[in-house]
Structure formats: C-alpha cells, structure tokens
Image: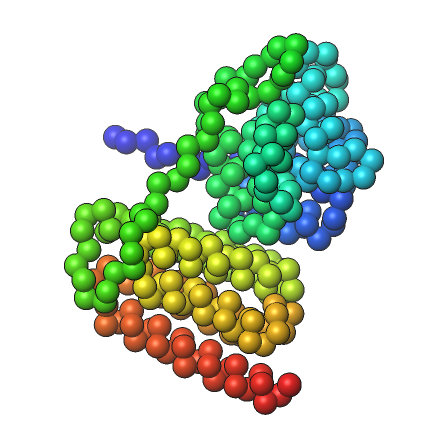
Amino acid sequence: METALRDPLEGLCVMVVDDHASTRRLVADVLRAGGVDRVVAAESGSMALGMMAATRPDVLITDWLMPVMDGLTFVRAVRRAAVDHDPRIPDPRLPIIMLSAERRRGDVEVARAAGADAFLVKPFTPARVLERVATVRQRQIDFVISAAYVGPDRRQGRVDEDRYGGPLRRRGDALDVGELAARAELCAHVLEEVATFQRLVEARGLDYLLRQMACRVAHDMRQRASEAGDRDLTRAAASLGRYVSAVGGPARADPEVVQIHFDTLRALALLPADSFKASATITRQLDKAVSRRISIAALAA
C-alpha cells in the first residue's frame, strides 16, 4: 500500500519579518491560504530575535530593507548562533527566505553570502511564496560552518524549472507528448494559483493589494502559458493587464471584472487539451465582456 506524500506546508510555523504592516499581513494571508498552520510576525530583525525562542519558527521570511535591524544583519545574527550560542535562537540552521523589491544578480549573491537559502522578489504571486517555502523545507542542503561563512552550502544551488520554450501552437494542431506534459503542468499551476487567490479574496476581500496581486498573477500566467504554447490561456491572462491599463490602474479595476478573468482562467485550465473550439469560445466571450466594461468605464470617466 502506497503512503501518501506529506504536504510540505503541513504543520509549519513561518515567521514573517517586515517593517510594513500591509506586507506582513499580505504574506501571512498567502501562507494561511496555502495551508501553513501558524504564522507569526515581527516588524524588525531585533523584534524577531526576541520572539524566536518562544515561537520556534520552522521557516523565516524576512524583508531586506528595515529600520532598527535590516534583513542582512538579521540573517547573519541567526546564522552566527551556530558558532556563538545565542539562547534567543533555538535553530540557527532553519531555512531563511530573503524578501526584496529588486532582484539584481549582485543582490542575490549578497543575500546568499549572508546565509539566506532563497530570494523572493516583490511583487510576488501566492504560488511563488508557497513554492519558495515548500522548496526550502524539502531541499536536502548541507550546512557549512567556517570562519568565513555560516549557512547553507552555496554550491548546492536551486534547480530552475524546466519549461517548454516553443512557439504558440495553432488552434487544431495536435500536441506531442512534450507539449501535453507542459500543458498539464501549466493547467495544474493555474488551478492552484486561482484556488489560493480565491481563498485570499474570501479572507480579506478584493482590496487594492489583492487587485495589484491579481495583475502580477495574470502576468505570471501569461508568461507560463506563452512558454507552454497555449494561445487561449495566454490571451485570457493578458486580458487582465489590458483591462487594468485601459481603466487607469488596479485602484480603478472593477472587482467583478477581476473575478471574471480568474473564473475564465480556471475554466480554460479545466478543459481537455484537445478542446480547441470550447477554448476559443470561452476566450472570445471574455474579450467581449472586457471590451464592454472598458467602454462603460470610458463613458463614466
């Protein structure tokens, strides 16, 4: 009898360290929507150090730029406890994800040199947050303790996702085995992302931050769909960006139209791979609905 695989997020306690309350809440909501059992929050590295012994987090997510104690200093303090015992830090080897508004190659290297396991860039999607947490929990990485460096072995880097990089297929073209596998992976991602986003909406309503996140999610889906060669999913995902630009940004986006896009993406992802006619019909219906809403918004402006 086969044993079911354990959810990597089950039973976790994740500490979110960020000086912006809105970001702390958003990351915490994403984690809870994804199935994380317990989330604790701190507004600075120094506050987090004072909380760790009592909360015993399994994963840390810390912002880079913070007053009092920034993310790099915080990460170094946690890792240093593997050399110089610090009663505030029960596990100096726990996985740490660095959160930043930018991702230059040099920034990634600086974070890794401080002892961070992974990097997460703002704006993020729910799936990206949950993937990062699951990845750092599941990876088997050696921990290095030396005079020059304390942290996860930097020679054991993360393996990038393999994605199909071919052209968008024409409607009616038969998919080969590789394309079928790429589309199945894409659809699974879309369904997971939509489900997590819907749980976020139920928890906090489709506020401005979630409308911003919706745009980021749709952008990510558009890229993935394009790389997988799915024309209709690409078009549907791109439609949200077209609508938001036309009405003047996420703050002016009608929550109902945002919801229509996510319902459409889910419907497309649930179709069999050879449902070309149904897929094209759903996409055309979305185009008409969005064009109508753009016209209404223009008249009201």
Residue drawn at the location 40% of the way across and 75% of the way down: 286
Look at the picture and state if 53 lies above or below 169.
above
Look at the picture and state if 196 lies above or below 75.
below
How was this image coloured?
rainbow
Residue 144 on image: x %, y %: 56, 14
**Residue 17 appears in which quarter of the rendering?**
top right
The quadrant in which the N terminus is found is: top left
Q: List the single residue furthest toward the bottom.
A: 299
Look at the picture and state if 72 lies above or below 146.
below
Q: Would residue 121 be visible to someone looking at this image?
A: yes
Number of callouts in the render? 0
**Residue 215 appears in which quarter of the rendering?**
bottom right
- For the residue pair 162 and 272, the one nearer the viewer reads as 162
Residue 156 on image: x %, y %: 46, 23
Residue 63 on image: x %, y %: 68, 40
Residue drawn at the location 62% of the way across and 31% of the way down: 111
The quadrant in which the C terminus is found is: bottom right
Q: Is residue 151 left or right of residue 240?
A: right
Residue 164 on image: x %, y %: 31, 47
Q: Is residue 262 left or right of residue 269?
A: right
Q: Would residue 40 be visible to someone looking at this image?
A: no
Residue drawn at the location 74% of the way across and 28% of the way down: 73
- For the residue pair 291 and 190, the one nearer the viewer reads as 291
